[in-house]
Image (spheres, helix red, strand yellow):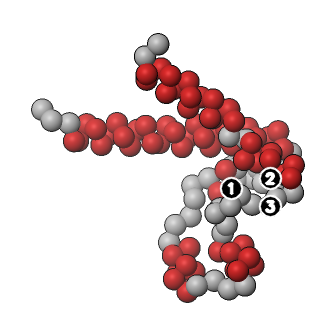
Amino acid sequence: MKIISKLWILIGVLIVLSPLGLLLPEHFKAGSAWGEWGADEMRQLAGYLPKGLERLSKLWSAPIPDYAFKGWEDKPLPALSLAYVFSAVIGILVCVVVVFILGKFLKKK
C-alpha cells in the first residue's frame, strides 16, 4: 500500500474519532477543551482579559463556531457528533484545496 493511501486512511480514522473532543469532556464534566476558550471564557478563567487579546478577538471569527452549524447548538449529542465529523471533513477539504492551489503556483515549470 502506498504511503499516500495510508495517510488518507489515517485522516479518515481521525475524522471518525473527532467527536471524542465533544464526548470525552461531556463524560468527564471537563468543560471546554484546553486552549479553545473564547474571550468571555478567558476573562472568567483568568479574572481579566488583556487589552491586546480583546482587540484581536474581534478580528477573526470561526466559520463554524464550536464545530456546530448555526442553529445546531442545542441539538442532542449524536447530532453534534455528526456536526463534528462534517466540520472535520470541511476543514480537511479546505486545507487540501489551499495546498493544491499553492502547489500549482509554486510548481517549477
Q: Amino acid at mark 3?
A: Gly
Q: Quadrant of residue 23?
A: top right
Say which mark, if any, is on residue 66. Answer: 1
Say which mark, if any, is on residue 31. Answer: 3
The label nearer to you, 3 versus 1, is: 3
For residue 47, above or below residue 38: below
Horizontal side, residue 107 vs residue 4: left or right: left
Horizontal side, residue 58 vs residue 86: left or right: left
Q: Amino acid at mark 2?
A: Pro
Residue under numbered circle 2: 25
Q: Residue 10 versus residue 84: which sits nearer the camera?
A: 10
* Crowd rating for badge 2 (residues with CA inside 10 Å; few <14, some 14–19, many 20+): few
Horizontal side, residue 53 vs residue 49: left or right: left
Q: For marks 3 and 2, give the CA distance.
A: 6 Å
Query: Residue 71 placed where, x, y %?
Result: 75, 53
Say which mark, if any, is on residue 92. Answer: none
Q: From the image, which quarter does the C terminus lie in?
A: top left
* Crowd rating for badge 1 (residues with CA inside 10 Å; few <14, some 14–19, many 20+): some
Q: Residue 1 versus residue 103: which sits nearer the camera?
A: 1
Query: Residue 97 placed where, x, y %?
Result: 40, 38
